Image (cartoon, rainbow, N blue to C red):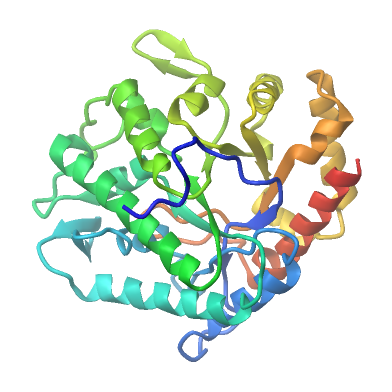
Amino acid sequence: MTSGRSDAGPSAPAPSATTTGVWIPEALDLGPGQASRQAASAGFGLLSDGLPPVPLIARPSGDRWGADAIGRAVGLLRDLHVDRVSYGWRLTSTAGRDERLEASGLGEALDAVAEYGEGFAGPVQISLPGPWTLVTALSLSSGVRVLGDPGARRDVIQSYAFGIADLAERLRRLGLSSVVRFAEMRLDPVLTGTWPTVSGFASLPAIGEAQVYAALTSTLRHLPPVILSLPDLAPLNVRGKTIPAAEVVRSTGAAAVSVPLASLRAAGWEQLATLSEAGVGTWLRLPAEAGSRPEEVRRWLEGIAEPWHRVGMGAASLSRFGVLTGEELSLSHPPLLDPAASPARADQPAMRLAAGLRRALEEA
């Protein structure tokens, strides 16, 4: 596998500003690649001092389809093939129409990044579902969940790691380094045995934490620096024992962690401080609706600084926070947009807010 980093261990991505990369076009009748070109132009223009994202295009049509993040992920699987059925994505023996469409969409995104990122000196950011989130979203050709088949989930995780390394290499050939953001939103049900079968009438057995962590560590070892995005920093309760969130993050080997600002309570801020002091990069994700008010930098700065100081952290350490804005990846099937999502809320204003808040954190 082509490795995005050395074996010396993970290096946390420098604190910066970025968005999830989800782009909602203002018009539906754009020509091939035009939405990706709009997204890349804005990303490299507004986040030239940050982490411009590789765009993931949503479709704001009458059925409110979002950006299919699982589709982006399965399009990266090396030597495994997929198609889409009524209940989601499944593994198949040969490439089908849906797989080819995903490859085409990624190609358009990379073409746009190559055009607008020419001469860009910093890394770009790729937002993808985490390996275990991807496993929960896939089925075998029989309809059985991949999560319940040890051999299949191992094959998927390995194929995914190879595919992401291939993507990082494609970006490197364009003259761009990369940072990967894994939206790993389903560790809790995987570890606690609460992820449902396809029918929804039963749950799949829990996967042991040692196996879950080992798979993540093995994946991350061969990739560029990874930001592990979690839904919160609540402790996990597994087989009668409580595992603090900081221990979970450190066990995966992630170089950095991202968490929604709105999810943090006092205990979450303490866990974030523990991770920061341990050298793990810390990123805060603002609510998607924050992008509609890019001028409210002071409000968000105060919302971060006050609880951070309450857990005993100094003002200087605020400069270590990265900032993430934008619509979160659509991980369900079908991948529907939030009803309130709109181009005005999700795109350029969110980028401006991320850049402005990041500068404010440095100055604080």
Q: Is residue 68 visible?
A: no
Q: Is residue 275 left or right of residue 303?
A: left
Q: Point out residue 205 in the picture as x, y percentages from the top left corner.
A: 22, 26
Among the 4 quarters of the image, the one containing residue 20: bottom right
Quadrant where the C terminus sits is: top right
Q: Considering only vertical position in the picture, is 207 above or below 32?
A: above
Q: Is residue 114 left or right of residue 238?
A: right
* Residue furthest out toward the top: 240
Among the 4 quarters of the image, the one containing residue 342: bottom right
Q: Is residue 172 visible?
A: yes
* Residue at the image point whose x is 74% and y is 54% from the top: 290
Q: Point out residue 11 in the picture as x, y percentages from the top left corner.
A: 57, 40
Q: Is residue 315 left or right of residue 46?
A: right
Q: Nearer the viewer, residue 16 or 302?
A: 16
Q: Point out residue 201 in the picture as x, y percentages from the top left corner.
A: 21, 35
Q: Point out residue 152 in the picture as x, y percentages from the top left corner.
A: 16, 43
Q: Considering only vertical position in the picture, is 243 above or below 147?
A: above
* Residue at the image point whose x is 31% and y is 64% from the top: 75
* Residue at the image point whose x is 74% and y is 69% from the top: 46
* Residue at the image point whose x is 41% and y is 52% from the top: 331
Q: Considering only vertical position in the picture, is 70 above or below 307?
A: below
Q: Is residue 235 left or right of residue 221?
A: right
Q: Nearer the viewer, residue 322 or 23?
A: 322
